[in-house]
Amino acid sequence: MHDVSYTPGTDALRRIGPLLLQAQDLTATALARLNALDSSAYASLPGSRAGLELLASVVSSSSLAGTDLAHAVLANPYEGAQFIDSPADSEAIRTSRHANAIPQMTGHLDDAAHQLDLSATGCHYLAHGITEDLASAQDHQATAGPALTPTQHDALAALKNGGRLYESSTRGLGVARVATDDCTRVSIATYRALAKRGLVTSDTSTSLFIGQKITVTEQGQQALTRPRPRAALTTAVATPPKAAVAQGVHR
């Protein structure tokens, strides 16, 4: 774009026309990528909005570049014949038309080059930003540990509505139990698994006999924003009844 050289007229049309088509192709491609990125899992990652907005700016800049190139095509002095009753242009008039058109065309081409530079810069930063967002998401997942099981997710959701940790009066001293406000059953093993990962905490300043209030931590709140995991499918192996087995032995 910066190095394009032309002679006003047909030569300019032949050289600028393909550049205009390329800019339009770039706009179409950028728009398609924006739609794909907006519909992908990337859109749910923290920081993805800035990436989507950056790609939208690429669509805008490439479209403006196409408009600038179209204006250059419009400013180009064409050599077609005049109307029948109009005198043909003299060489002086032709030279004057070219001289007036060149600064306008040059200005439009410079503007187009600037917009394409912005598009290239936007694409560079977008690629870098997507890489960083994906790496950050992977680091966050590694820090958060393995995904919750369906049982853990349900227990965490129940504890968010309120719950207490008690010392069991039926199982002996030193054995704790969990009671939720909505009466969802949460085993002590599930509670301890959640507490070990820092998803819940209890008010240890209160006696277990009175009941320690359970609080879902900020990390636990974030875990609840993710979709509930599906239970793993298990394949049951049919086992013949013992009576049938015994009959088979006697035969």
Image: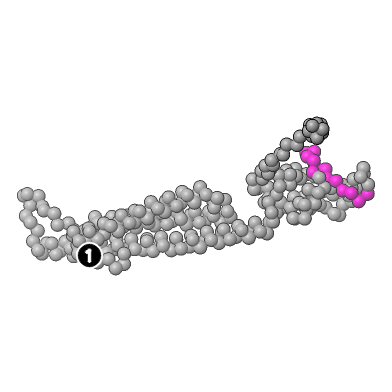
Say what amino acid the circle numbered 1 marks: Tyr
Can you give x and y, in whole percent of width and height, for residue 208 in the image?
Answer: 89, 49
Which residue is most to the front? 251
Where is mark 1, residue-wise? 6
Whether 129 is among the magenta residues is no
Q: Quadrant of the C terminus?
A: top right
Residue positioned 10% across, 52% down in the render: 82
Q: Is residue 217 left or right of residue 28?
A: right
The image shows a total of numbered marks equal to 1
Q: Main secondary structure of the magenta part?
A: loop
Where is 201 relative to 179, above or below? below
Looking at the image, residue 116 sits to the left or right of residue 158; the answer is left
Residue at coordinates 44% horizontally, 60% vertically from top-left? 123
Image coords of residue 205 (percent x, y): 86, 54
Q: Secondary structure at mark 1?
A: loop
| Quarter placement of the N terminus | bottom left
Q: What segment carries the magenta color?
A: 173-186
Is 157 placed above or below 21 here? above
Q: Any magenta on residue 175? A: yes
Residue 49 visible to an observer of this rendering: yes
The residue shown at (39%, 64%) is 117
Residue 241 visible in the picture: no
